[in-house]
């Protein structure tokens, strides 16, 4: 039950952050970042299992692996951006958080262009 570990780590970090904010508020953000990294490390093995499963399904279904790789990169960018945005908001920097959101969305759209163009080509082939 990895979720219990994740919740336990989060609650312990939350208690430490609440205590630290009273005496040394500048250290609270460090605990938040370390907690996020620790949780990501805990789920890394699950993530590799998911990627292997997707690769297996893609090879059986004859799906272009370039598209699968691209989708996985886009998903990774979305997760990392959300992590960065959360840290920025925790630090009270909403303006930086919104800039990270905008930047990540633009990067995701730019990376999606090959998939979008391939879908449009398929649609154009279907239409008379």
Image (cartoon, rainbow, N blue to C red):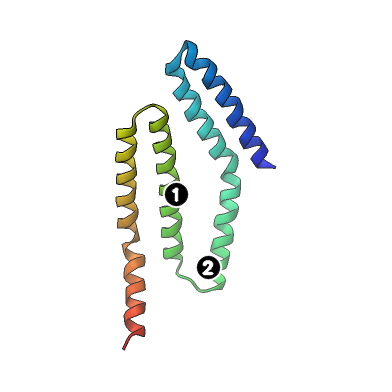
Q: Which mark is residue 76?
A: 1
In the displayed structure, 110 sits above or below 42; it is: below
Foreground tag (1 vs 2): 1
Q: Which mark is residue 103?
A: none
Q: Answer left or right for 95 relative to 5.
A: left
In the displayed structure, 67 sits above or below 18; it is: below
Give the Cα separation between the discs numbered 1 and 2. 18 Å
Mark 1 packing: few (<14 Cα in 10 Å), some, or many (20+)? few
Residue that appears at 57% across and 55% down: 50
Q: Earlier in the sequence, mark 1 or mark 2?
A: 2
Q: Identify the secondary structure beneath mark 1.
A: helix
Residue that appears at 34% across and 33% down: 94
- Would you identify the image quadrant in which residue 118 lies? bottom left
Q: Identify the secondary structure beneath mark 2.
A: helix
Check disc 2 and report the residue beneath it. Answer: 58
The quadrant of the image that shows the C terminus is bottom left
| Residue 80 screen position, x and y as percent | 43, 43
Residue that appears at 64% across and 41% down: 3
């Amino acid at each position: 039950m990895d979720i219990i570990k994740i919740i336990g780590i989060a609650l312990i970090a939350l208690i430490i952050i609440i205590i630290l904010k009273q005496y040394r508020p500048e250290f609270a953000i460090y605990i938040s970042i370390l907690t996020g990294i620790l949780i990501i490390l805990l789920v890394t093995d699950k993530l590799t299992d998911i990627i292997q499963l997707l690769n297996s399904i893609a090879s059986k279904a004859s799906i272009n692996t370039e598209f699968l790789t691209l989708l996985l990169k886009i998903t990774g960018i979305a997760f990392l951006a959300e992590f960065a945005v959360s840290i920025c908001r925790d630090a009270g920097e909403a303006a930086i958080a919104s800039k990270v959101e905008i930047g990540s969305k633009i990067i995701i759209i730019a990376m999606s262009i090959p998939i979008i163009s391939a879908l449009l080509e398929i649609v154009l082939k279907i239409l008379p």
